[in-house]
């Protein structure tokens, strides 16, 4: 078994958290390699709706604490990256929409007008007049209110792909089975399940989403603990004249959006609507067929002027992986934990990966990790026997059987 490669920093897991970390560390002059078990972005990141939240969701739920206000800056930080003026170069990534929208029906809108007019909300959203309505709300049958949020929606596959391309010299496919601290040293051995090599790293950064749990167990670390919050995300596809490209939250009686819809282009000229929000949370435990039935009913009642009869349907079961909250609540900001030279991180939201990486860099600075090592480790040939990791397909590209 080859085991002579020593790395300054090993990042485990190539979702948005690992890739953003790698990009920032490389720019800062750190030596880092990333190992991904399967395809880059293949778990939560590729399955996300790609909305770069600015905190509206938290403002709606009254969870906009002082620290969570840093989320408000996320759309600007990401936009700078998309323009090539930010901390990470995302010029090749695609924007699906400049804005996420929010709509509510007439009766609800009249009850919450005061709230929407409050300062906390007006800084986040703009009330649209009818002449500015976008599809599918530009119909006389739509009798609700429409708001425009300053929150872009991104094609996450293209975000992942541009980061992969820029750093392909240090991204490898390898499922880390075990990490152990080397006896009497402050370094770690990384053991892969599908590779005949063992590597040594001085610092470990665990950005493996739900995979962090097993990695922490292999290190015998009892903290941090992780929680999973499952979703069953319905999706439907049809030609664009049936499903226009739309990006919107539907506000119901509770503050959690009743439904969050994002639209994604399929290669065969069809458009997919991907449905999050309450429908995805309440659907957990249902069969795909049952969830599809519920989604059909719900969509038809929210948009009675639309015809979904020619659509094909499916649903994706997926867990959100986050740090465990002592009161069982949903976390609202990224969390990072350090034990010796092991840093474990969950961004909690894709949009918040930049804040998560700020915190990781603060920890590396506290640890005094060398910034001027060669970009790649010596004996890189050992690692070069590993395959490069590829970018994930998106959830709707993996569906085998669509339901009518
Ligand atoms: C359905 C859904 C919709 C969402 N929509 C949004 C949204 O619109 N906006 C937003 O801001 N957030 C959204 N989120 C949240 C967001 O997607 C996540 O917070 C974020 O993607 C987490 O990124 P990550 O890199 O930590 O995890 P992941 O993307 O899950 O990446 C972890 C990676 O680690 C790899 N891995 C695991 N174990 C190992 C191992 N042992 N060895 C090597 N590699 C390993 C996995 O294969 C995976 O690629 C959504 C989440 C879900 C589930």
Image (tube, rainbow, N blue to C red):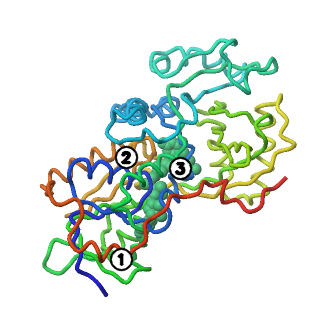
**Percent x, y for residue 363?**
21, 52
- For the point 44% across and 48% down, which residue is it? 162
SS at mark 2 in the image? loop
As measured in the structure, the alpha-carbon distance from the residue carrying label 3 to the one carrying label 1 is 29 Å
Q: Quadrant of residue 217?
A: bottom left
- Against 64, residue 372 (above or below) is below
Res 197 visible: yes
Q: Earlier in the sequence, mark 2 or mark 3?
A: 3
- Please tell me which residue lies in front, 180 or 107: 180
The residue to which callout 3 is attached is 157
Q: Which mark is residue 178?
A: 1
Q: Secondary structure at mark 3?
A: helix
Residues 257 and 350: in front is 350
Which residue is tagged 2?
Answer: 334
Tell me the quarter of the picture where residue 185 sits.
bottom left
Residue 36 lies left or right of residue 114; in this view the side is: left
Residue 87 - label:
none
Q: Where is the N terminus found, in terms of image quarters?
A: bottom left
Residue 378 image position (x, y, % from top left): 20, 71
Residue 224, image x, y percentages:
34, 60
Tell whether 351 sits left or right of 181: right
Camera-side mark, 2 or 3: 3
């Amino acid at each position: 078994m080859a085991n002579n490669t020593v790395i300054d920093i090993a990042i485990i897991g190539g979702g948005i958290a690992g890739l953003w970390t790698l990009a920032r560390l490389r720019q800062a002059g750190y030596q880092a390699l990333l190992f991904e078990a399967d395809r880059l972005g293949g778990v939560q990141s590729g399955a996300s709706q790609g909305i770069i939240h600015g905190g509206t969701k938290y403002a709606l739920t009254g969870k906009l604490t002082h620290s969570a206000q840093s989320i408000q800056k996320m759309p600007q930080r990401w936009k700078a990256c998309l323009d090539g003026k930010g901390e990470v170069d995302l010029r090749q990534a695609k924007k699906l929409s400049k804005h996420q929208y929010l709509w509510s029906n007439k009766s609800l809108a009249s009850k919450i007008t005061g709230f929407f007019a409050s300062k906390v909300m007006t800084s986040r959203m703009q009330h649209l007049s009818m002449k500015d309505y976008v599809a599918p709300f530009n119909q006389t049958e739509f009798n609700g209110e429409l708001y425009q949020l300053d929150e872009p929606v991104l094609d996450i596959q293209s975000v992942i792909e541009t980061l992969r391309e820029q750093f392909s010299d240090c991204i490898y496919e390898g499922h880390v089975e075990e990490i152990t601290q080397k006896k009497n040293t402050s370094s770690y051995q990384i053991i892969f399940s599908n590779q005949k090599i063992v590597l040594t790293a001085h610092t470990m950064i665990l950005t493996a989403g739900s995979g962090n749990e097993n990695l922490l167990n292999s290190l015998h670390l009892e903290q941090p603990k992780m929680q999973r919050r499952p979703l069953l995300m319905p999706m439907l596809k049809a030609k664009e004249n049936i499903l226009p490209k739309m990006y919107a939250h539907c506000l119901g009686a509770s503050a959690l959006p009743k439904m969050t819809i994002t639209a994604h282009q399929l290669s065969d000229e069809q458009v997919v609507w991907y449905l999050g929000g309450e429908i995805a949370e309440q659907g957990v435990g249902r069969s795909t067929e049952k969830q599809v039935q519920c989604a059909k009913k719900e969509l038809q009642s929210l948009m009675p002027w639309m015809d979904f009869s020619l659509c094909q349907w499916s649903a994706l079961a997926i867990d959100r992986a986050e740090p465990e909250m002592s009161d069982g609540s949903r976390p609202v900001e990224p969390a990072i934990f350090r034990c010796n030279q092991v840093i474990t991180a969950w961004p909690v939201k894709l949009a918040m990966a930049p804040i998560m990486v700020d915190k990781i860099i603060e920890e590396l600075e506290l640890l005094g990790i060398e910034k001027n090592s060669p970009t790649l480790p010596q004996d890189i040939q050992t690692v070069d026997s590993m395959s490069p990791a590829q970018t994930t397909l998106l959830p709707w590209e993996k569906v085998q059987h669509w339901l009518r």
